[in-house]
Image: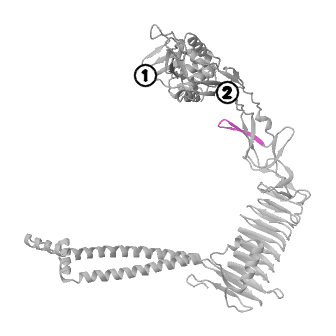
Amino acid sequence: MDAAQRTAIGDAGPTTRGRADSANDPVLPGFVVRRSDGLFVDLERFRDSSEFRHLIERLMAAGYLFRGISYADFCALMFDYPAAAVKEAVAHCRSSGREAMIRWAAALDSFDPARATLYRKVHFDDGCAYYLFEPVCLDAVGTQSEASEPTRLDVDEFIVQMWLKDLRAGLDVDTIRDCIEHQRYGRTLIARTIAPQPGADATVLELCNGLRRDDRPRVLPDGRADLTQFSNRFPQVKNGVRLLRKVAPVPGKAGRDLRGGLLAAPVPSDFDIEDLAGPGTRIERQDGEQYVSAAMDGFLDIDADTNQIAITTTIVHRHGVSVRTTGDLALMGEHFEEFGEIQERRTVEGRSITAHADVFGHVVSSGGEVRLERNLSGGSAVNRDGPIRIDGLVVNAWVHAPRGEVHLKRAEGAVISARHVIAEQVIACDIYADKVDIADVQGCVVAATTMSLERAGARRTAATTVHLVLPRTAALRKRLSALRDEANRLDSEIAQTEKRRAALVDDPEISRYLQVARRLRSGELSLKPEHRSAFEALARRLAPGLKDCSVLSSHLDECRSRRTTLDDSLAAVERELRTVLGDSRCTIGTVAPGVVIRAMEIAEDDKAIGALSANELKTRLRAANSRGRVLPHAEGQTFDWQLSRDEPQS
C-alpha cells in the first residue's frame, strides 16, 4: 500500500488539533488530530516520519499507549513518509477530492506501570524475534505472586512494550493477537526482518520474434535439431513494426531490520534507448513507453559490439539455396528473389517468392505471387493464398494453389491442384481444380467442377480420364427429406383433426348453436331477453361439445400455421439445393481416342480433395477411375455436357 492509499477521510465529528482534551492529556503537535473515531495525522501539516517517531517516543516515555493501533499505518507513518512522499500523498488526495488524513490509532491512553512487569524480554535470532508466551498474574499492588489474580496481556500494550524493548518493525500482529486471545503459550516467532525488495534494471523487450541471425540448426518444438535449416538466416520486418520496447528500471523497496533501521534496496541500472537505434529505425514514444520501430521494410542487422539494431534494404540473394550456404529458409518479408538454384530437398518459405533459376527443391508461399522463371523439377511450388506462374517446364513436381490460379506452359508427370488451372500442355499429370482451362491434355487424370479442354487424348498406352466433380448435396437432401416427412405428418394430422371437428359440428344442436352464435357476433341477428336466456341455457347444456370443438379448431389453426412455415422452409432448402448444384459443365473441343469421361460424386465424409497432399491426391484420383457415372461421348467429336439443376445425381 503506497502513501496516498493510506489516507482516509475522517468523520465530521468534533476535532481537536494539537491541544489536550483535559488536564491529564498531553499537548500534541498540530499535525495530530483527535476525532471521535480516532487519532489522525494531518498530512497537510506533517513534515516527515522523523517528526512522528519523535512524538511516539516522547509519549511512550511519558507513560502513554495507543488503543486500537492500526499497525500497518502506524509503521508507515514511522518510517515510510519522507518529505517527498508526504507531498505526493497530499497531491494525490487533493486531486481525488479527499481529506489528507491517516488514522493510526483509536485513542490515547495512559499505561499502568504495574503491567509493565507482565511483558518479558524479547529474543533476537538471525533476523527474527521470539517471545515466550505464558500465563501471567498481577496482584493488587502490582507484584507477581502465587496468590495474584490471573490476567492477560494486551495487544496495544504489547506493541508499546516491544518498541521500548527495541523491537520496532516487522511485528506479526495477527500472531500476537491470536496467542493472547486464545491463550496459546510457548516460544513464538512474533517478528521478522522486512527484507528489501530488489528492483529491476532497465532492459529491452523484443516485440518481434527472431530479431537475430542465427546459423545454428533450428530446434523443433519437440526438442530435436533440424540440421537442414538454420535458426534464422535472414531476419525481415515490415515498416512500422515495433522491434524493441524499453522496460524502465523499477526501483526496489527498502526494508527494515527489527530495530527499525533502514535496509536500502540496490539501485537499478539504466540506459538511453537512443543508443540502440541505428539506420532504418526510429524511436517512438507513446503512453510513457519508448520503442525502437522499423522505419522501412527490410532485413534486420544487429551490431553485437554496439547493440545497435538497423534495417537494411531488401536483399536479393544470388548464391542459391543449399545445405552448405543457407540451409532451408523461412522468410518474413514481402518479397524474396533468388538468382541461384534452389537445390534438391531445400525449402524456401516466405511470401511473393521469385526464382530466376531452376528449382529442384520446395517453394512455399503464404500469399502474394510465386513465380518460377525457369524449370521446376522434382520439387514443389505451393502458394496458400495466391497464384503460381511457372514459365519453364514442370517435371515430376507438385504445384498447389488452393486459393489462386496456376499458370503453366508445359507439365509432365506432375500433380497439380488449385482453384483454377490454366495450362498449354499437360502430359501424364494428375490435376484437380474448381475450374480447368487446358489446351492439350495427354494421358492425364483431370477432375474439376467446370472444365474447358481444347483437346484430350491418350499418351501412348495411358488413357485420359476426365472427372466432372459433382457438388456435395447429401446433407441438404437429407434435410429436404426430413422436411417433407414432417409436411406429410402435418397433412395427416390436419386431416384427422378436420374429421373429428366435422363429426362434432354435424350434431344438429351444435350446428344450430354455432350458426346463431356466428350471426350474433356479426350483428346479423339480435335476441330478445327471453330468447337470450334460452340461448345461454342451450350453451351451458352443449358446453362439453362446444369446448371440444373449440380445442380442435385451435389445434387445426396451429397445424395449418406450422404447415405454412414448413412450406417456406421447404422452398428455401430447395432453392439452396439448386444454388449448390450450380452449373457443373465439361467442354472438350476434340475428344481423341483413349478418353473416359465420368461424373464424379464425392462422399460427404470424405476429406476435401483440395486439402490432400500430392500423393494422397494422386491416389484418390486414380482410385476414382472405376467409379462414377460414365458420360457418353463420340471420338473425334466435340463434347459438351452440363448438369441441370433439377437432374438427380448418381
Instruction: Check if residue 282 falls in the magenta segment.
Output: yes
Q: Residue at x 20, y 77 (%)?
A: 514
Left or right of 449 in this view: 362: right
From the viewer's perspective, is residue 468 above or below residue 232? below
Question: Which residue matches tag 1?
Answer: 12
From the viewer's perspective, is residue 467 above or below residue 67? below
Task: Say which amino acid is labelled 1.
Answer: Ala
Residue range in magenta is: 281-291
Task: State whether residue 31 appears in this view.
Answer: no
Q: How many marks?
A: 2
Instruction: Check if residue 477 falls in the magenta segment.
Output: no
Q: Give the quarter of the figure containing the N terminus.
A: top right
Task: Say which amino acid is labelled 2.
Answer: Ile
Residue 527 position, x and y percent, is: 11, 72
From the viewer's perspective, is residue 238 above or below residue 542? above
Question: Which residue matches tag 2?
Answer: 194
Pick whichever, 176 or 441, lies toward us: 176
Residue 399 position, x and y percent, is: 78, 70
Q: Main secondary structure of the magenta part?
A: strand
- Nearer the N terminus, badge 1 or badge 2? 1
Image quarter of residue 145? top right
